[in-house]
Image: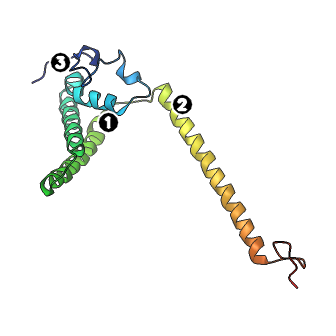
Amino acid sequence: MFTHVPSFRHIPTFGRSTIRRFAKNVSGLKQMAGRDFEDILQCIIPVFEGLLPPPHDELVQTLVFTIAYWHGLAKLRLHSEETVAIFHAATRDLGKIVRRFLRKTCEAYDTRELPREEAARGRRTAAMVAKQGAKASRKLRKQQASAIASAGPTSGKSFRGHSTH
């Protein structure tokens, strides 16, 4: 059993570049690198332990452990048939635990986006709408160009300015 660690900031470093010192507010970090996510994943179990009441705490601990286990398997550089089978089983287990987490724990809590997250979602939506508008505009121009090309020349001149006669 782990001893509860109040925050990521209380986790000691490990080696020079293995696990670095965490910022005061891990949830507020911006522009994180892959190593930052890995460090958080490796240290999250003792930080999250005991944060929620008993039925949800066990589920969160199982979810976090399963994610860490799956990530460790995914990072293997060489797989055998056995490790691929283990990875498939771990992926199924991860799907099951995520669905159970959504049904039980997520339903039990009223969660909200941070203002920063809400703004980012708004920017992504606006960018996607703009991109779709640009695609639709390009598609319309292509259709018009193809319709003009298939209609053939309207005067005695061909598309390249040469006479058709």
Q: Is residue 141 left or right of residue 126?
A: right
Residue projecting furthest to the bottom: 165
Of residues 131 and 84, the one drawn nearer to the viewer in this rendering? 84
The quarter of the picture where the C terminus appears is: bottom right
Residue depth check, mark 2 versus mark 1: number of the one nearer the observer: 2
Indicate the secondary structure of the residue bearing disc 2. Answer: helix
Query: Residue at point 61% right, 51% down?
Result: 132
Q: Label 1, on which residue?
A: 106
Q: Residues within 10 Å of mark 2 (few under 14, many from 20)?
A: few
Residue projecting furthest to the right: 156
Q: Label 2, on which residue?
A: 119
Q: Label 3, on which residue?
A: 4
N-term mark: 2 or 3: 3
Indicate the secondary structure of the residue bearing disc 1. Answer: helix
In three-dimensional space, the C-alpha distance between marks 2 and 1, rounded to whole angstroms, equals 22 Å
Q: Amino acid at mark 2?
A: Ala
Location of residue 159 (image quadrant)? bottom right
Q: Residue 89 location in percent, x, y?
A: 17, 52
Residue 41 is marked as none
In three-dimensional space, the C-alpha distance between marks 1 and 3, rounded to whole angstroms, equals 23 Å
Q: Amino acid at mark 3?
A: His
